[in-house]
Amino acid sequence: MIREEVGVAALEHLRELVGLCGPACLARNPIATYEAMTATDDVVYCPFAYGYSNYARPGYARHTLRFGGLVCFAGQPLRSTLGGTGLAISAHCRHTEQAVAYARFVADPACQSSLYFTSGGQPGHRAAWEDAEVNAAAHNFFRDTLPTLDAAYLRPRYPGYLHFQDEAGPVVHRYLAAGGDARATLAQLESLYQRYRRP
């Protein structure tokens, strides 16, 4: 999955970072973190989390958040993982033509930059991310985070990856919360990776 020295260093650096954070950080997902940031003055900065543009829109929460690119480490800008959700039509759909027409309507750049966005949606079309009016309405959330998306690593799509992620996440979480042997943690991750990477 990764060279041992790189994986161990990554785990140890993450544990060091978590040690500088409050214990609640290990119990929150990105949305809960943003909720904490907008509801109180206790949390003012989050270096890594998926972006949710509604928190950059005035009036959505008590405080409006400002989003930007990722931090640098050892002089190098860090990269994120690009995943997210999509728009699909079920194989069991009984009204395929209408579903396709609706999907085309929603995915159209004109809709993405207007009705979809103004209705509270987070557009997926690049034209909406570059649209001046969309950015003005969201404190430049899209313009300021687009370089991070452009530089991101596309989440693996092989069969089994989501199972690997589901099981690997708690392994990393346990290490970050309780410490322990980074090499043993990496070995657990490697074992899971090998199990789910097989065709």
Image (tube, rainbow, N blue to C red):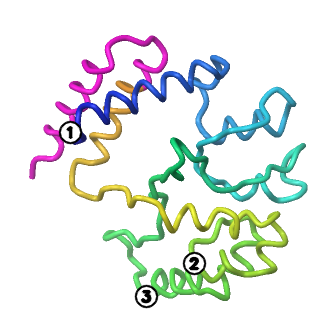
**Cα gap from disc 1 to disc 2, whole angstroms:** 32 Å
**Cα gap from disc 3 to disc 1, whole angstroms:** 40 Å
Number of labels in the image equals 3
Task: Place residue 1 in its image quadrant.
Answer: top left
> Is the residue 31 above or below the residue 4 in the image?
below
Residue at 78 percent of width and 80 percent of height: 132
Residue at 45 percent of width and 84 percent of height: 100
Label placed on residue 125: 2
**Cα gap from disc 3 to disc 2, whole angstroms:** 22 Å
Residue 20 spot, x, y in % from top left:
63, 21
* Disc 2 residue crowd, few under 14, some 14–19, many 20+, Cα 10 Å: some
Q: Give left or right: position of 182 versus 87.
A: left
Eye-nearest disc, 1 or 2: 1
Which amino acid lies under the numbered mark 3 shown in the image of this protein?
Glu
Magenta extent: 173-199
Task: Place residue 38 in its image quadrant.
Answer: top right
Mark 1 or mark 2: whose residue is earlier in sequence: 2
> Is the residue 87 above or below the residue 21 in the image?
below
Q: Secondary structure at mark 1?
A: helix
Residue at 40 percent of width and 28 percent of height: 11
Label placed on residue 97: 3
Which amino acid lies under the numbered mark 1 shown in the image of this protein?
Tyr
Give whichever of 144, 161 is nearer the camera.
144
Pointer 1 residue: 193
Give whichever of 102, 24 is nearer the camera.
24
Which amino acid lies under the numbered mark 2 shown in the image of this protein?
His
